[in-house]
Image: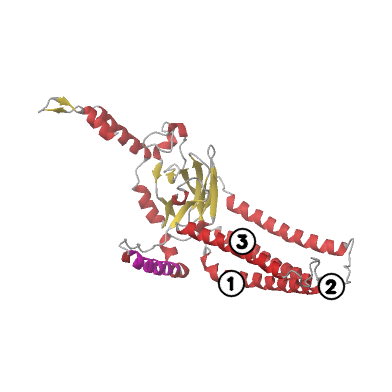
Amino acid sequence: MTSLLIIIVLVLLAVALWQLTKIFDLTQVGSNSDNSEVATDDDNNVQGYIMFAFLAFLYVFTIYGLFKWGPLVLHTAASEHGSEVDNLMNITWVLIFIVQAITQALLHYFAFKYKGKKDQKALYFADNNKLEAIWSIIPAVVLAGLILYGLYAWTNIMFVDEDEDTIVIELYAQQFNWKARYSGEDNVLGKANVRLIEGVNSLGVDMSDPYSQDDIVVTELHIPKGKKIHFKIRSQDVLHSAYFPHFRAQMNCVPGMVTEFAFTPVYTTAEYRELPYMVEKVANINDLRAKKSIELVAKGNAALDPYTFDYLLLCNKICGASHYNMQMKIIVDTPEDYKNWISEQALLVRQIEEANTTSTLVDGAVDIDSTKGRDTSSVVKVVMK
């Protein structure tokens, strides 16, 4: 209701201003004002100074933005290839900033210097080979350098040698959650098909495949520091995107096909939490949450829990109504902790066997109530379903 009232007030204010301009125009009737609508030297001078004012605003806002929002960008990369991505990004935006600063300054300077003056005619060049060469060759060389560097970085990041020692993990996307399937001791994922999805087997793993017998399915991703992880990515329903912001990695999840990405973590979760910039960032977030909690408690609501940093796997495609909530926690362990964790996880084949055993027991159960002589097995089936 408040928004509607604000909109109505703004509309009425606009109408009032429009009526005031009409009244002002009526008061000028009979005056010697120039109605030719041809710009005078005074008009051109004003426009020239306005151009300079806009140039100043552009630079001031750019510098303000760097100081205001600069600290919000991602800081230290948590993967081996992350520094290469950051270097490419930094080189690109520095070049863009330099070119923008020079071209905008020249544009607004010439707009002022060569503003219109009475009886002054523009000097027109039909052709200038030197200028054409300068503003064609220089951008071409710079862009070629950026593209070649980008291709080199992309090749290094995406190349995975078949003989390389990696851990193969499948990331499975569905609205609106993630699951991870570990390839087990043989380091080979079993075959899978969405037509095989049933009950506990929510990823459609083909359990007749020998390679599936040691697969492990979890909802929290654990990976070891210093080990290259080869991710194979699938989607069950729509287009998703596996986004690891702190690892500088992203790959689309496309229904009907398997996409791949690989990276090597260089900081455990505990180590990344201790980085100076992260300690400062977490402290700032918790300070804001503490202030917000005071307001919430005053209104009778629960206080916010303190924030603790964790790596996250996010979806970077708008995949539906709950897209914002599609995330999975990532824990980077030491190699020893990772081995301990993976050894404690139940195999998918065992989970399916247990589910089938439980289902068989329930379906075959017959319970006769001695007091009423009534078969209650159908009640058990309904409750379990």
Residue named by callout 1? 64
Q: Amino acid at mark 2?
A: Lys
Label 3 neighbourhood size at 10 Å, few (<14), some (14-19), many (20+)? few
**SS label for mark 1:** helix
In magenta stretch: residue 99: no
In the rendering, at what x and y percent does residue 103 appear?
73, 67
In the rendering, at what x and y percent does residue 147 appear?
69, 56
Question: Could you tell which of marks 1 and 2 lies nearer the N-terminus?
Answer: 1
**SS label for mark 3:** helix
Residue named by callout 2? 117
Residue named by callout 3? 89
Question: Could you tell which of marks 3 and 2 lies nearer the N-terminus?
Answer: 3
Q: Amino acid at mark 1?
A: Tyr
Q: Which residue is painted at 45% across and 37% down in the image?
A: 190
Answer with left or right where residue 139 lies relative to residue 324.
Answer: right
**Would you identify the image quadrant in which residue 99 lies?**
bottom right
Residues at circles 3 and 2 in contact by the CB criterion of under 8 Å: no
- Name the quarter where the C terminus is drawn: top left
Count of number-bearing discs: 3
**Would you identify the image quadrant in which residue 280 lies?**
bottom left
Q: Amino acid at mark 3?
A: Met
**SS label for mark 2:** loop
Q: CA distance from mark 1 to mark 2?
A: 36 Å
What secondary structure prevails in the magenta region?
helix
Query: Can see residue 31?
Result: yes
Question: Could you tell which of marks 3 and 1 lies nearer the N-terminus?
Answer: 1
Segment colored magenta = 281-296
Residues at circles 1 and 2 in contact by the CB criterion of under 8 Å: no
Q: Which residue is painted at 51% across and 44% down in the image?
A: 232
